[in-house]
Amino acid sequence: MTPAPVVEQYLEVAPGQRLYVQHRPGDATRLPLFLLDGLGCAGFVWREVWRWFDGHPVVHMQYRGHGHSDVPHGVDTLTVDVAVSDVRRVLDALNLSAAVLVGHSMGVQVALECAHRLGHRVRGLGLLCGSYEKPIASWHGAQEKNGPARLDNLLLRAVFDPLSQFVIRRSSSLAPVWRAVFRTPLAYEIATRQEVDGTRLGIREFGPYMQDLAAMTPKVFFGFARSLAEHSAAPYLRQLDVPAWVLGGGRDSFTPRWRSEEMAHRLPRAELTVLPAGTHTTPLEYPATLYEGLSRLLQRASGKAGA
């Protein structure tokens, strides 16, 4: 059977600000999957999801300044709160009353905030390799919650605020350097040797991320990063009474496994999967686990957990 075509369109969410949205209609009786990227990503994690869930409506929104979406003039709209408002606008524009939100990395924080603010419109949460709060605090941090802090984590926490402000101020002049760095073979080699499992991911799987990152404006990356660094869903996690699936990686240097375990423990209806060898791109490294976890989540969110 030929998969249903994917509709691509721009939605104006504010004067002079358009979001690029992909969506595929499906069985109207099924809950849509709404896919939320990580910071700097423009959909590379979801390549197989479109194929697997052909019968379901699927929606993918590119954040402001990401992929094909317009780059805002300033950084005041590059926040988790505005991303949540954009999710609502997309749901409204597509006449979707509710959806199951699936977020990777930054998308986890956006999905949690959506569940908190949009209420019944969020029927389930897929939370993949992301923190529920302040990811800078745990980036390259201790693998155990109370373990000793690592030097690279201490260094980032010390320089993040002045560094991010500097990059935002000098974004235009730094953009050529930014593009050149992320397009080099060395950047790809470092990423696949230190941050992701290069034995499971090749240029076909991980290359699009490096391309997306190189194409974005530095102020967009650091504008969102500053918002993420301050955001926390901790005050309301225990109130999010919807089916949730948390996926973590034992070798994830961005979101240590204890963060995923904490989040799953605090969410009232969460199931947890931690793959010991998984990194920050566990959803791509272990596609069978992703498929099974999302299938189970959709069943639970639809009240068919026993199916």
Image (cartoon, rainbow, N blue to C red):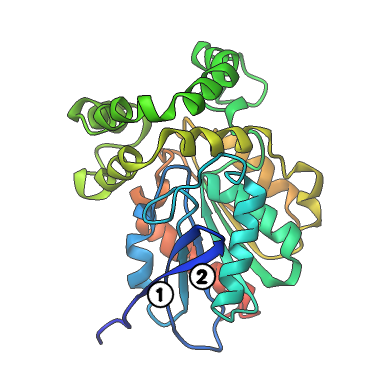
In the picture provided, is 200 more to the left or to the right than 174? left
Q: Which mark is residue 33?
A: 2
Instruction: Tell us which disc is closer to us: 2 or 1.
Output: 2
Q: What is the distance, in whole Å, between disc 2 and disc 1 at their CAs?
A: 9 Å
- 2 and 1 marks in contact (CB < 8 Å): yes
The image quadrant where one finds the C terminus is: bottom right
Residue 53 position (above or below residue 236): below
- Residue 214 placement (x, y as % from top left): 31, 38
Residue 196 position (above or below residue 19): above
Q: Which mark is residue 249?
A: none
Tell me what residue is drawn at x 42 percent, y 56 percent: 69
Q: Secondary structure at mark 1?
A: loop
In the picture provided, is 206 more to the left or to the right than 35? left
- Residue 124 placement (x, y as % from top left): 63, 66
Tell me what residue is drawn at x 47 percent, y 70 percent: 59
Identify residue for label 1: 53
The image quadrant where one finds the N terminus is: bottom left
Tell me what residue is drawn at x 76 percent, y 42 percent: 234
Residue 200 position (above or below residue 36): above
Residue type for callout 1 = Phe
Q: Residues within 10 Å of mark 2 (few under 14, many from 20)?
A: many
Q: Residues within 10 Å of mark 1 (few under 14, many from 20)?
A: some
Tell me what residue is drawn at x 56 percent, y 69 percent: 90
Q: Is residue 221 visible?
A: yes
- Residue 35 placement (x, y as % from top left): 49, 62
Q: Secondary structure at mark 2?
A: strand
Q: Is residue 269 visible?
A: no
Residue 290 position (above or below residue 79): below
Residue type for callout 2 = Leu
In the picture provided, is 136 more to the left or to the right than 71? right
The tag earlier along the polypeptide, 2 or 1, is 2
